[in-house]
Image: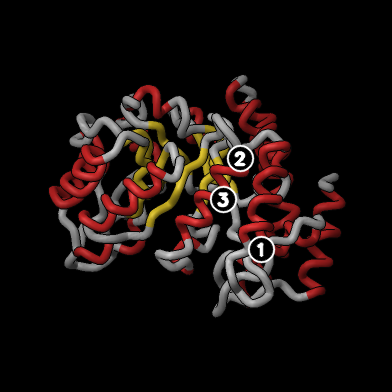
Amino acid sequence: MNREELRQLIQGTLVTVPTAFDENMNVDLARMTDLTRWWVEQGLGTNTAPLKVTAAMGEGPNLGDDEWPHVLRTVVNAAGSGAVVMCALKSKNTLHAIDDAKRAQDLGAVGLQIDLPFFHHCQQDDYVRYFTDISDAIDIGIMIYNTHWFTQNPQQESMQTDTMLRMKDAEHVAALKWSPAEGQEYDDMTKIAHVFNIIDNTGSPVRCHRNGGRGYISSLIAVYPPHDLAIWRLLEEGKYDEAQARFDRVRSALADWDARTRAKSGGYRQGKGMMAALGRPAGPPRPPTLPLDDDETAEAARIMKGLGWS
């Protein structure tokens, strides 16, 4: 596929799906199958709501190299023919990143989320070589995850907006998961939005879309798909005030609960807890992250009931 074809796939409300574990912290592939089928029934796994597996919210960094391919294969098979499934890869050197990218492609992913190679103390030329070499080795799409917060040391540079433009000939680099690094402005995305799909990662879907962006990351769509599917429809219709009001209503309702649960334990425990509260458990997170306790789960259930989620 070429970039324009890939841009038609890697857009919308990207669905970072949790990885299901059983009570012994083993990957629960049967549960992943059931959840994937439910997500597809709810309208996910499309070119406006791609399913993205093994990302950070999906505890991808906690999965072994013998585990993530099974998760990807399970989701691809359960989602069915024609579903849009992406796979997030861990930060590795170019050679091993290409191996993982080819494996994900062979397992049915149509796109990849790839972090900056932050362990390598990169300069701008290194970023260009890294993503261009991966692009040249595969036929599926790449969404660069601008993980600039891992690069804040004197030995490594954050990736600059102009560096993205240097990758315009890397045909499979189709999107950028966007949050501005130090020294950048949010609206700098307008310099590159005509070449790459910009996917907001700051909780600013309306601002992103107004700037020509083509999607955003939601931590809630896997929990209750109708919320973010409705927001995306409003964005595409240009009904920005209505989209912002819907987004703010839910964010405000969850804000205090979210802050308190994050203060107790880090990681991505909230999404799994909310799914359990709605009767669709995905098991506990892997340690050191703690699962939600009964009181936290019950409070989440009350909030979501108040929002009309079920």
Residue drawn where x is 23% and y is 34% of the image: 170
Expressed as whole percent of the image width and height from the top left, the position of residue 176 reads 37, 40
Instruction: Name the disc covering residue 74, or none.
Output: 3
Pick whichever, 258 or 278, lies toward us.
278
**Residue at 50%, 35% in the rendered image:** 215
- Residue type highlighted by circle 2: Ala
Image quadrant where residue 294 sits? bottom right
Which residue occupies the extreme bottom position in the image?
288
Query: Could you say whether the residue bearing mark 2 is in a helix, strand or loop?
Result: helix
Is residue 204 visible to the viewer in this orientation of the structure?
no
Q: Which residue lies at the image location 16% right of the left edge and 46% below the top edge?
A: 129
Q: Which mark is residue 79?
A: 2
Which amino acid lies under the numbered mark 3 shown in the image of this protein?
Thr
- Using the rendered view, name the quadrant where residue 231 is placed: top right
In the picture shown, does residue 47 fall above or below 304? above
In x, y percent, where is residue 146?
A: 35, 50
Using a 10 Å C-alpha cutoff, classify the residue at mark 1 as few (fewer than 14 neighbours), some (14 to 19) or many (20 or more). many
Query: Residue 6 in the image: x percent, y percent?
Result: 40, 29
